[in-house]
Image: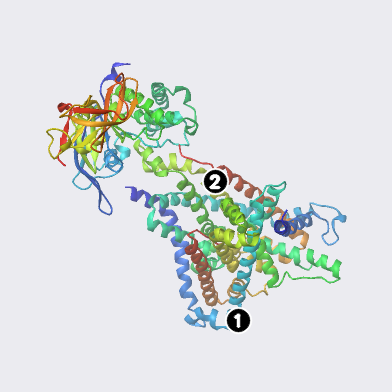
Amino acid sequence: MRLSTLAAGLLTVLVAAFLVVPALVSIVAGVSVSYSRGLSEGLTLDWIFEVWRLYADTILRSIMIALATLVVTLLIGVPAAYALVRRGGRLARIAEEIVTLPLAIPGLALALALIITYGGVRELRVSSAFIVIGHVLYTLPFMIRSVMAVLQSFDWRLLDDGAASLGASPWRRFVDIMLPNARPGILAGALTVVTLSIGEFNLTWMLHTPLTKTLPVGLADSYASMRLEIASAYTLVFFVMIVPLLVAMQAVARIGEPRRTA
Amino acid sequence: MTRRFEFLLLLPAGVFVLAFLLVPMAALVPVAGSGRLGWSAYLAVVTEPRYRATMISTLVVAAATTALTLAIATVAAQFLASRRFPGRDLLVAMLTFPLAFPGVVVGFMVILLSGRLGLVAQASEALFGERIVFAYSLGGLLVGYLYFSIPRVILTVMAAVEKLDPALVEAARSLGAGPFRIQRDVVLPALAPALVAAGALCFATAMGAFGTAFTLATRIDVLPMVIYTEFTLGGNVAIAAALSIALGLVTWLALALARNATGAVAAAG
Amino acid sequence: MTAEETTAHGASLSIRRAGKTFPGGVVALAPTDLDLPAGEILVLLGPSGCGKTTLLRLVAGLGAPDPGGAVLFDGVDVTTVPIERRRVGMVFQSYALFPNMTVAENVGYGLKVRGEPKSSRDAEVGRLLDMVGLAELSDRPVDRISGGQRQRVALARAIAIRPKILLLDEPLSALDAALREKLRIELARLLRRFAITAIHVTHDQAEAMAIGDRIAVMNQGRIVQLGTPEDVYVRPADRFVAGFVGVMNRLPGRLLPGCGVAEAFFRPEAVAVGPPEAGSVVAMVTAATFFGAYRRLTLDVAGHAVEAEVPAERPVRPGDAVSLAVDPARLHVFPT
């Protein structure tokens, strides 16, 4: 083996260790009786229960917010993606650019803009819906792009013409032909939206109130004020929620690849 | 007929984006001019020494993150893409699993690595009798941003490396080029579009990242932290708005430049 | 075959001054008139870009004609009726089968959209799949059947809605040559059996001959000849038709007796080849290919290549000098 290859391999392994070791430490710390005295003190699930006692509401709220965000992005994002692909041309590109803007603007700035505009509406400001709005803004581009990509991967116009020639109205074609054939993209988009929503912090930290804390907000709170074992156990809970979503995302990406039109 | 159908499909998303993106962003503009500094708040990021220093340090950290991440990802992606060996899939999984970690969790990882009770502190105490702690400084922030960026960039670069025609490298080798020459003359030019796109994304994300800095310390002066403290602690909405707009412009510009350079679509978190 | 199947159905079609200009001013179709009685199969034949697909899409409702043009089904103006309400059966070049549905679901989709109850729908789908010989594949996903089978699913799907007019857009062009030849005959048989008004677009003149009751030869956005296959083959209207349909020789008129300055067109079978004699047109054999029933010769006539057919038993070889005569009844002369 060449020296340069050996060095590259070593670097790769070191970087992998850099990424994995802290996460492993956190997992171990979350189930250790005492982090500072090491594993010799034994393992325990007490910290997990403690996290549940202290932060169950944030975990459940994050799940609810993620699902609500998913519903909204599906309802407004999937039709919008189809419209943009159908319409094409310069106007559609400008519309796509605008929808994608929240990816280029830091979450903090977006949150500030939302608070300045709608912070005065008390019912909205104190409800989880305010956070859902922020999450939809941030995740909508991912849903739209994912669906647009899959629509562009097959000859949607041909299938649309085909269904039209058989007497199907535009809405019927959308429901019967476009939605089923765009399913891999919708699924991939949905997983991305849920994953991003559960982990979103930048917007949420600004938008939340003491009564609408989410999981990442709770995490920040525990990192600042709780003992390391509780913070680690809480992080472990987060890992357990997020890793299956990531695995599913990669599985969907693999299934979605070999597609063709008949 | 078909126009009306497309309009109706787009309407819900359009109303949402208008109400919760365009109107609020437009509202940010006059707010920024309403404070003690008036419209010159927009220039504060250049004229006020404190904000200027913050802007510079934010740019430096983001640029350093981008350069280091690209270098690491280019080496690792080529190592992983060009060969199959036992444990390769595991290695790829290890390199990409922090993909969806929010900034706060990344901050916690940095604390576990280089904080007061961190691995580096324990190791250095055992070896040199002295605890090395750098989590709560700009150095710690840089480590955090690397932790955050490496998985994303590696994925992009790996995809680009896999599309690279192996015959190019073989041809260069047959002509007698050494590994460094091949990198400089063949591989890097071929990867350039992907590197520019991924680098811009990495830079924009690092500019706007807030969670990591927030977790590590409130003392680190990067732009998002300053916006946050001005808004919540100082109650200085105007400056926060002006700095937000400045920050948004920088990140948007970075992505727009990259897109013009590559034609690819880039996005920041 | 029941009586109902053999009687002609479908609508008559009239096209009145329908043209199509694309943005940018490119005229894809000059204003065109065309009448098609119910039950007739018309083939639009021409090279790519001649406007045949554009004309087909105007009939389908996939594009609107320029102002002033009209499309009528059974005398009723349908120009502004969108495709989904025109009741045209369309077989697309790449079939446009729905990958999310099985063979039977594809065929039954048009009936489902029309709200036909499942029982009668299933019966009709079964009947059609039987007819095209795909009954045993009805539950297959459409990406698990062959190209030829897809083509027949597309045809059954288009027929299922009992269309007023069946439109076929180069339905055989996605298949390889051997299969295309086989399915050409099959398709001609099925279309006769459906006895439906149909327009079939192709650039393949053999396909046009096999399928059409009449053929409209198109060139540069116009119908240049409309007639039976025999008409088009035997009496080409102009140089383009003469050159496009079938194998055709062309010689400057001065080389043949009595043709003047015009250009002469004639088919290989119209050429009589004899021993060289004074006063006749003399040619040199450059190639001779044995075809079983006949021998195809390539002759050199004053630097022009001419194809001719002679009985297989005539021992003509490359290098032989021959005389050449063309049957005046089968000689077409067009001014240059």
The chain to which mark 2 is attached is: A
The chain to which mark 1 is attached is: B
Give left or right: position of B41 versus A219: left
Query: Quick check: can you spot residue A119?
Result: no
State the image quarter where residue C61 is shown. Answer: top left
Q: Residues within 10 Å of mark 2 (few under 14, many from 20)?
A: many
Give left or right: position of B145 versus C107: right
Q: Are marks 2 and 1 on the same chain?
A: no
Mark 1 secondary-structure assignment? helix
Residue beneath the point at 58% across and 79% down: B51
- Say if C146 sits above or below A148 in the image: above
Mark 2 secondary-structure assignment? helix
Measure the alpha-carbon separation of dots 2 and 1: 47 Å
Q: Amino acid at mark 2?
A: Leu
Give left or right: position of C124 versus B236: left
| Residue C187: percent from left, percent from top | 34, 26
What mark, if any, has residue C184 been given in the picture?
Answer: none
| Residue A166: percent from left, percent from top | 36, 35
Which residue lies under the disc numbered 2?
A187
State the image quarter where residue C13 is shown. Answer: top left
Query: Quick check: can you spot residue C297?
Result: yes
Q: Amino acid at mark 1?
A: Arg
Q: Residues within 10 Å of mark 1 (few under 14, many from 20)?
A: few
Between residues A226 and B113, which one lies in front from this camera angle? B113
- Say if B250 sits above or below C253 in the image: below
Which residue lies under the disc numbered 1?
B50
Between residues B10 and C89, which one lies in front from this camera angle? C89
Residue that extends furthest to the front in the rendered view of this protein: C278
**Quadrant holding the N terminus of chain C:** top left
| Residue C264: percent from left, percent from top | 18, 35
Between residues B111 and A149, which one lies in front from this camera angle? A149
